Image (cartoon, helix red, strand yellow):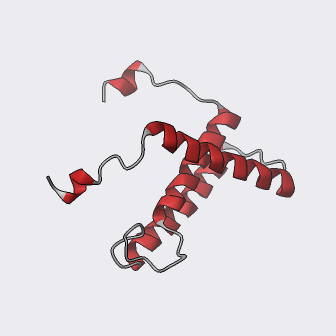
């Protein structure tokens, strides 16, 4: 079995959602301290792009990738940014709507 396949599914969906929920809790505390935290969809997209860019930067500069075993001690891995981006997507839908997958989308 390939190394990639052996490492597949390091977390079950429930654990992933727990991590996202924890990030949302953190974001909500920050929002209350700093501002109302209400944003249009476009603002969320900009926030998400920023954190994706940070994840990309880490992946391109850390030895063995941002989540590799060889990353510097204490460095924030790119998966931390993926968690942030995902939680920002959740916040965006909480504030602006969460349309269900439609028939057109399911045909892709």
Q: Is residue 32 left or right of residue 59?
A: right
Count of all numbered marks drawn on residues in the image: 0
**Whether residue 14 is situated above or below residue 43 in the rendered picture:** above
Q: Examine the rendering and report whether any part of residue 42 can be seen.
A: no
Going 29% across and 54% down the picture, which residue do you hit? 7
Q: Quadrant of residue 38?
A: top right
Q: Position of residue 89 (x, y in %)?
A: 58, 44
Going 71% across and 52% down the picture, which residue do you hit? 26
Residue at far left of view: 1
Q: Quadrant of residue 74?
A: bottom right
Q: Position of residue 48 (x, y in %)?
A: 57, 55
Q: Which is more toward the observer, 65 or 35? A: 65
Going 71% across and 46% down the picture, which residue do you hit? 25
Q: Is residue 108 left or right of residue 56?
A: left
**Whether residue 67 is situated above or below residue 9 in the rendered picture:** below
Q: Which is more toward the observer, 8 or 62? A: 8
Q: Which is more toward the observer, 40 or 101? A: 101
Q: Locate the C terminus by quadrant.
A: top left
Q: Position of residue 102 (x, y in %)?
A: 44, 21
Q: Is residue 35 left or right of residue 53?
A: right
Going 69% across and 44% down the picture, which residue do you hit? 40
Q: Position of residue 58 (x, y in %)?
A: 45, 72
Residue at far top of view: 103
Q: Examine the rendering and report whether any part of residue 30 can be seen.
A: yes
Q: Quadrant of residue 84?
A: bottom right
């Amino acid at each position: 079995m390939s190394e990639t396949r052996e490492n597949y599914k390091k977390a079950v969906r429930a654990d992933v959602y727990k991590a996202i929920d924890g990030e949302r809790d953190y974001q909500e505390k920050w929002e209350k301290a700093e501002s109302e935290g209400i944003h249009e969809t476009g603002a969320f997209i900009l926030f998400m792009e920023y954190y994706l860019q940070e994840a990309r930067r880490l992946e391109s500069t850390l030895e063995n990738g941002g989540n590799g075993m060889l990353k510097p001690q204490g460095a924030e891995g790119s998966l931390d940014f993926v968690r942030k981006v995902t939680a920002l997507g959740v916040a965006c839908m909480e504030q602006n709507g969460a349309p269900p997958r439609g028939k057109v989308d399911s045909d892709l």
